[in-house]
Amino acid sequence: MPPKKKDAPSKKTEQKQKAKDKTFGLKNKKGNKQQKFIQQVQKQVLTPHQKASQELAAQQKKKEDEAKKKAELNNLFRPVQTVSKGADPKSVLCAFFKQGNCGKGAKCKFSHDLTIDKKTEKRSLYADDKAEDAMDAWDQEKLEDVVNKKHGSKNKGLPPTTICIPSV
């Protein structure tokens, strides 16, 4: 191997010389003039690689800020989903799933079935659906008609029964 040349300085020594702090002792000074001088010297000393990395960092910070703003806006304007009293939540389509961003998955109390269009309320077992067709309002003919429909085939050989309606 040939001997190393000692005439030209290596790249590392050049970088070290550039990186030498030309502002030694001035950084803690409070004067406006000194601070401007320090900033100017630091800009001159920066290598192209450092400049590129600073620009990259600035771009990444800008993207992160935009993402934070977008997330904040989504949190502010996200839909609030409520269910009317008596309705089953599984019969209501999840608003977040509809938008494509329901994070609860299987734990979500709302339905993730897109075929469900509208919520349906549970029927009450104790309330009548048709109040006008209540048994209290039936007359003799209606009672006989209902009895014949119910027990018509059993009573063919027997005489007709009379039904007493108490007068109110």
Image (cartoon, rainbow, N blue to C red):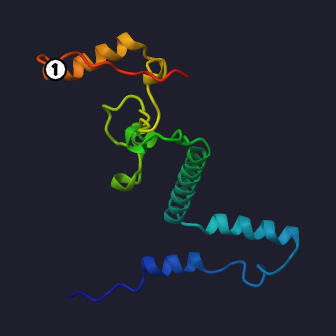
Depth check: give the residue in front, 128 or 12. Answer: 128
Q: Mark 1 points at which residue?
A: 155
State which quadrant residue 88 falls in.
top left
Front in this rendered view, residue 60 or 36:
60
In this rendering, the answer to whether 134 lies above or below 91 is above
Locate residue 70 relative to residue 89 in the image: left or right: right
- Compared to 151, does 43 lie above or below? below
In the rendered image, residue 68, in percent from the top left (x then y), is placed at 57, 53
Quadrant housing the C terminus: top right
**Outermost residue, top side:** 141
Query: Where does the N terminus fall, quadrant-wise?
Result: bottom left
**Which residue is outermost to the front?**
159
Q: In this view, does 122 lie above or below 141?
A: below
Give amino acid for label 1: Asn
Picture coordinates of residue 97, whole percent (x, y): 39, 42
Residue 6, by quadrant, is bottom left
Camera-nearest residue between 111 and 137: 137
> What element does badge 1 sit on?
loop
Q: Is residue 41 left or right of residue 17?
A: right
Is residue 30 shown left or right of residue 113?
right
- Residue occupying the point 77% across, 84% down: 25
Residue 19 lies, in percent from the top left, at 58, 77
Q: Where is residue 93 in the image (x, y as percent from the top left)?
A: 40, 37
**Could you tell me which residue is drawn at 11 percent across and 17 percent down?**
157
| Total residue callouts | 1
Dot 1, how many residues are within 10 Å of its Cα: few (below 14), some (14-19), or many (20+)? few
**Among the 4 quarters of the image, the one containing residue 20:** bottom right
Residue sticking out furthest to the right: 31
Q: Residue at x 65, y 64 (%)?
A: 43
Q: Kindly give the residue lying farthest to the left in the view shown.
A: 157
